[in-house]
Amino acid sequence: MALEFSEKIRRIPVYPTAGGYALGDEYAMLASNEAPFGPLPGVEEATLRALRNVNRYPDPSNMRLRRALAARYDFPPDRIAIGAGSCDILLSAAEALLEPGAELVYAWPSFSVYPQMAAATGARTIVVPLDADDRHDLDAMRAEVTVATRLVLVCNPNNPTSTALPLDAISAFVAGVPRNVCVLVDEAYCEFNVLDDPDASIELVRRHPNVVLLRTFSKVYGLAGLRCGYALCGEEAFRVAVEQVRQPFFCNSLAQAAAEEALTHQDEITRRVEQTVAERIGLEEELRALGLTVADSQANFLWHSLARNGDADPAARERAIVEGLAERKVLIRAGSALGREGWARTTIGTAAENRRFLDALAELL
């Protein structure tokens, strides 16, 4: 007799993880938006120091890291939530806010975890298509907010399309959403966004108690393997609620120590961003020269077509190119797994990795 699982197991979509992690260092890993840089100075030492005490549980209050973030952003530590990656906070926010009869509003294509949030809680999903420029259509999203809406997600810059809206547009949108609706602005890639100062959005949570800014150490800080994210919350109640629905020790001691040390190296973060943006501009230009359509990126990855205009079967073209790149030891994400056939999401790697990708792609095209 087979095991009987809950109804939500049949509802929750499987997260489309990228492959390639067991293939070896000879591959150009451009599929998961990871930083191509190694740990920041001092991070390895801080992690090794923490390793000596792994016989003890991690600090369940995450207080040292919360205080470090509070000093970094001049923000109250009791309104900072920590998670095992930003996904941990997202799923906990769904558990804390959503239930049958409630509604969740988000744009699509966007981050692949979002569909899991309503499915796991029994809430209703309202999906709003992106606009013609692959950006959030905030007017259309605002029109979908009803008395049943509990949570609105705004991914800025958006994953997978790499596009971003200026802070003024986000601010105007937030002002038009009822104060009892949580607006969670997912800013995993905000450091790479040159439309505004990445820290400028913090004013949103100072002015609006219903706003949460979600950020991560997985991208520009290069700590994806340790899993640490955080949220700057408009009110302390959000932090308390997401902690209440999780296990007690949700962020390990090595991740906390590494993140705390990483925060002290903002000059190096600035250098990494400058290098990534320079590579991004060059990649955009070369992809367009190949006849491909490229979204205007504000992230550490590009969203681009793999089929040229008039291609009879974009999906087949996508499969052939993604597979051909993999044969040449270059891994990118197929757009069909992220919401659009015939497209791809390509992480910006080192200069050598980017050159390797472009040469292989030109050969395949």
Image (cartoon, rainbow, N blue to C red):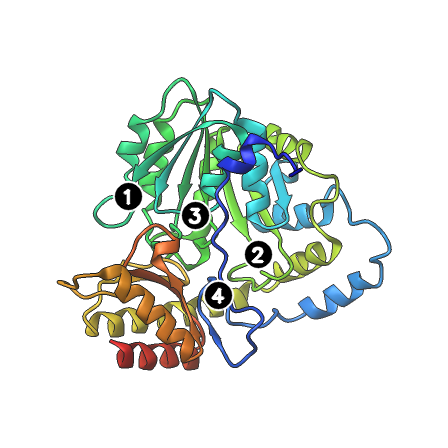
Identify the disc placed on residue 111.
Answer: 3
Q: Tag 4: residue type?
A: Thr
Please tell me whether mark 2 sits on a helix, a strand or a loop.
loop
CA neighbours of label 3 inside 10 A, class few (<14), some (14 to 19), many (20+):
many
Give the Cα distance between marks 1 and 4. 30 Å
SS for dot 4: helix
Q: Quadrant of residue 268?
A: bottom right
Pinpoint residue 208: horizontal percent, then vertical percent: 46, 30
Residue matched to label 4: 270
320 left or right of 94 in image: left
- Name the residue furthest top: 147
Total numbered labels placed on residues in the image? 4
Q: Which mark is residue 217?
A: 2
Q: How far across and down, in percent of the image, does residue 10 sit? A: 52, 37
Q: Is residue 314 above or below residue 118?
A: below
Q: Position of residue 182 (x, y in %)?
A: 47, 29
**Mark 4 and mark 3: Cα distance apart in space:** 25 Å
- Residue in the picture at 58% in, 72% down: 38
For mark 1, what is the residue? 130
Measured Cα–Cα span from mark 3 to mark 1: 13 Å
Which residue is the extreme one toward the left?
310
- C-beta proximity under 8 Å, tags 1 and 2: no
Above or below: residue 159 compared with residue 247? below
Q: Could you say whether the residue bearing mark 3 is in a helix, strand or loop? A: loop
| Pointer 4 or 3: first along the chain | 3
Q: Earlier in the sequence, mark 1 or mark 2?
A: 1
